[in-house]
Amino acid sequence: MALNDWMLLLHPTIAIVTIFPLLGIVLYQALLTRKRRLSLKDGQKTPIPATSGPEHVRLGRILSLSVVAIALLGLAQPIFSKLLASDALSKTPMRFLGLTLVFIVTGAALPLLDRAKNRAFRGLFALLTGGGLLLLGSQPEIFHRDGQWYLSHYYLGITAALLMIFSLVILQEIYRDRTHRWRNVHIILNSFAVLLFIAQGLTGTRDLLEIPLTWQKPHIEALYKQSCQTKPCSVESQK
Ligand code: HEM
Ligand code: HEM
């Protein structure tokens, strides 16, 4: 396999090894946190430890940071591999440097968002992180699957990453709000995020099947061109 092929495998490997196991633990702790809170509310004793809530939040924050980081890695691979293949560094250096800067600012705003205590700063860093993801995602190097957005690894992945950013933004509000409105908003949105993560496993695996290895690419392209001469090309191709 060529270096490019190994680079392509980096994002899925990290997602499988880190995001999905972490998600399992965060979900388990979420159920314990809720069970414990409801038991105590009903005046019942519960064997669930008081650490389940703080543990859910500690790992939830790591999950949020990891999901945004993995989305950035997923965006970086196609953008930089295509830019380097088209010699963009010498042809369009300003665009190359501009995109590199957006990656750096987005990546730097992420830990700052996690650490910010002040509401205004949280808003600002969330805007920088989310805006950066959307700006990078809108680049022509990214395959969006616009005609089938509901099965698009890009649209579902960016939505999941934005929901994780939102979880970080409202973290303090969940504790402050005595009416549990933010708690319920959190549960509804993040249950939806869990479905999106499952969809990422499915659509990511499909995308890996669709992207040929470097040595296969010229043969597949030749076959594709050949078949287009005899019948209309209806198959949507990633590369
Ligand atoms: C990814 C899927 C997630 C799901 C399904 C989920 C679900 C839940 C549930 C069911 C609760 C308990 C609510 C209750 O007491 O009734 C909870 C609490 C909480 N979650 Fe999550 N959550 C997720 C991720 C996250 C993340 C990523 C963060 C932080 C960035 C987070 C922060 C919190 C906080 C601050 C609480 C309150 C904890 C407490 O009361 O001690 N959650 N979540
Ligand atoms: C939480 C999990 C994940 C998130 C948030 C995520 C997000 C993303 C994003 C935003 C992109 C760039 C847009 C695109 O090309 O579609 C991407 C690319 C990609 N992802 Fe994921 N992804 C996740 C998990 C996975 C998994 C589990 C796999 C495979 C098993 C996978 C395979 C891919 C592939 C093959 C690409 C295309 C890279 C290219 O075009 O060169 N992803 N991902």
Image (cartoon, rainbow, N blue to C red):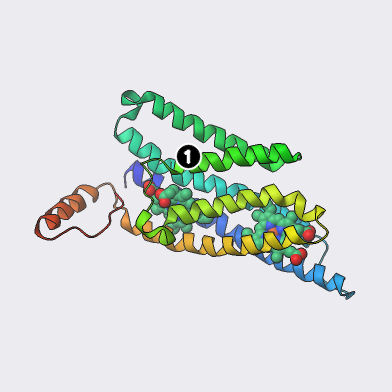
Pick out the residue farthest to the right.
43
Q: Residue at x 20, y 50 (%)?
A: 221
Which residue does the numbered mark 1 point to in the structure image? 135
Q: Residue at x 60, y 40 (%)?
A: 127
Does residue 12 show up? no
Residue 25 placement: quadrant: bottom right
Q: Callout 1: 10 Å neighbours few (<14), some, many (20+)?
A: some
Residue 104's x, y, as percent? 53, 32
Does residue 213 show up? yes
Q: How many marks?
A: 1
Does residue 120 sit above or below 66 in this rendering?
A: above
Q: Is residue 157 left or right of residue 222?
A: right
Q: Residue at x 55, y 55 (%)?
A: 160
Q: Is residue 141 left or right of residue 34?
A: left
Residue 87 placement: quadrant: top left
Dot 1 lies on which element?
helix
Residue 27's x, y, as percent? 65, 64
Does residue 28 sit above or below 105 in this rendering?
A: below
Residue 105 placement: quadrant: top right
Q: Nearer the viewer, residue 75 or 23?
A: 75
Q: Nearer the viewer, residue 4 or 118?
A: 118
Does residue 123 sit above or below 189 in this rendering?
A: above
- Residue type at mark 1: give it: Leu
Q: Is residue 25 left or right of residue 37?
A: left
